[in-house]
Amino acid sequence: MATTISGQCFFYVWAGYQTSIFIFITAITVFFAAKALENSNLAQKQYLKEHKEELDKEAKTAYKASCQRKRNLILTATVAFNLCILIVLKYVGFFLQPLGISFYTLMAIGYLIDINRASYEAEKNVLRFITFTTFFPVVIQGPISKYNEVAPSMFKEHTFDTNQFMSGMLRIMWGFFKKLIVADRIGIAVSLITGDSCTYAEGYVLVGMLFYTCQLYADFTGGIDVTIGVAKILGINLSENFLRPYFSISLKEYWRRWHITMCQWFRTYVFYPVSTSKTIQNISKALRSKGHTTLGKKLPVHLSSLIVWTLTGVWHGANFNFLVWGLLNFFILMISEELDPLYTRFHGRFGFSNTKGYKIFAMLRTFLLICVLNLFDCYKTVGETLGAIASVFTSKGYSAISSGALMELGLSGIDYIIIAIGVAVMFVVSLIQEHYATSDKELTISSYLKLVLTLVLFICVIMFGAYSIGYDSSQFIYNQF
Amino acid sequence: MEELLEILQELHPEVDFETEDKLIDDGIIDSFDVITLITELQENMGVLISAKDIIPENFNSAKALFALIERIREEEA
């Protein structure tokens, strides 16, 4: 733990100690609130045990309700206080935004709700809880870790493990390969295309869309690879955030494989509580009793889903683009869900849904959909995004792609070759990982091979990384969220 | 248990709920199914499963789900 704490101190002084105060405020308020919640839970159990005989059912229910009200007050006040900090610093923006505020706030709130639900025991040591909340690799862009999943490896006694160290180093270098060779190089063209939607319309939008989807994947998964690698070197196991998302055959599957920890957070702490709340269930019941059976059945799922996607959009930023992006995701998922019985009947009749060809088609279709949705992340306004999409359909030709104009996007022929090789390497690695994951086999690499691969990746990063004046490798797309 | 099996069968007719014990782990039922199931249980069996009980262990098999329903009923009694 001493190594981790030393790392934290250095990191926060380097990242800007003025804004670091907020992460400590969150850690400390949540720590003490969680302790109060656990104490209240334990006191309730103890009281009911001691007065088991003398209390009737009504008295027990009343006592439980009174304790629950007290806990709800602590929980609501602490969550509201920390969300206020997030909203003021992230959305109002009159003060510098602390690094990773969107990530550590969700982690801390998740912990508090877990303790209120008595899912596991609260941390007793404030220093240990601060170490968890402020764990420096995670605050940059996640993964949004759960306390009970990280704590066992974070607070056990650590000894140097060569194999773990080599695994960590390999993961870090693999992350930098994606980030510095592919993402930052392709990002030069993306910035040019999306920065001037009037000049770079029509065919350029298709190029920008495809390039941005590659950039986002290489940047975000690369960043998480570095995070998981650093944690591994310190002997700490973090949850995986991606499971080869571009192999998904539907948008629903994509959201089970992309930014997994964020999706899990919204599912556990928003989707489930809202959809199972008495209010929603009573509305559903009332609709059914009035004969609206289907609507009553569907309402909890779709209404909660709408709330989740609105919040997910807003969480990404105070920009109308993100809200529209979230709502589009909701509508596509809702329509897919409603049309599912129709698809099942259709596939049942024609029976080609299990063929390899159809799966590849479904993957490409999902990939294209993701590319289009990602455009809302690229442009500054909804109008600009829709204008860019419309220009693709009103275009009289796509000469931008064929006339050699690609060479005027800030990238040379050599750059395109490096990007193509980088993307091909990422694709082959993903295919190998997918093969092992679907066949339940374990991919084992010896320490010696890990060392060789790490060195090869290191040389590639040094030779082919996209460095230029003013370049800052510590900037990731997801930093801004 | 029979009533529960009927509800599950209506949700996914192709699944053998009497033997399947990795409903969540193998992605046979997803979060949308879980909520549809909870709404059905509330309507037909009068049991409201709260968010804190939505964990894979409680939804991986019909048997585990039935045990959860029994536990909720006992707590309410």
Image (spheres, grey):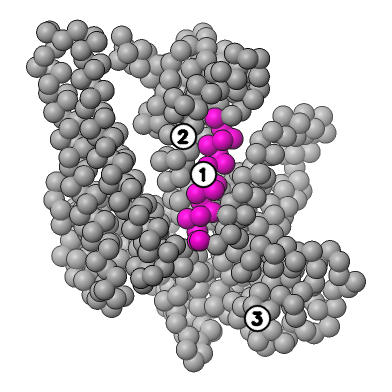
x, y percent for residue A294:
66, 22
Of mark 1 and mark 2, the one earlier in the sequence is 2
Foreground pick, A301 / A156: A301
Report the residue marked by disc 2.
A274
Proximity of marks 1 and 2: CB atoms separated by less than 8 Å: yes
Q: Read off the magenta span.
A: A300-318
The amino acid type, in three-letter code, at marker 2 is: Val
Q: For the point 75% across and 42% down, which residue is it?
A: A355
Q: Is residue B51 visible to us here?
A: yes
Q: Residue furthest right?
A: A396
Q: Residue A192, which numbered label?
A: 3
Relative to B29, residue A152 above or below: below
**What is the crowding at mark 1: few (fewer than 14 residues within 10 Å), some, or many (at least 20)?**
many
Q: Is residue B45 magenta?
A: no
x, y percent for residue A222:
48, 67
Q: For the point 48% across and 38% down, which residue is it?
A: A271
Proximity of marks 3 and 1: CB atoms separated by less than 8 Å: no
- The quarter holding residue A75 reads top left
SS assignment at label 2: helix
SS assignment at label 1: helix
The amino acid type, in three-letter code, at marker 3 is: Leu
Chain ID at mark 1: A
Of mark 2 and mark 3, the one earlier in the sequence is 3
Total numbered labels: 3
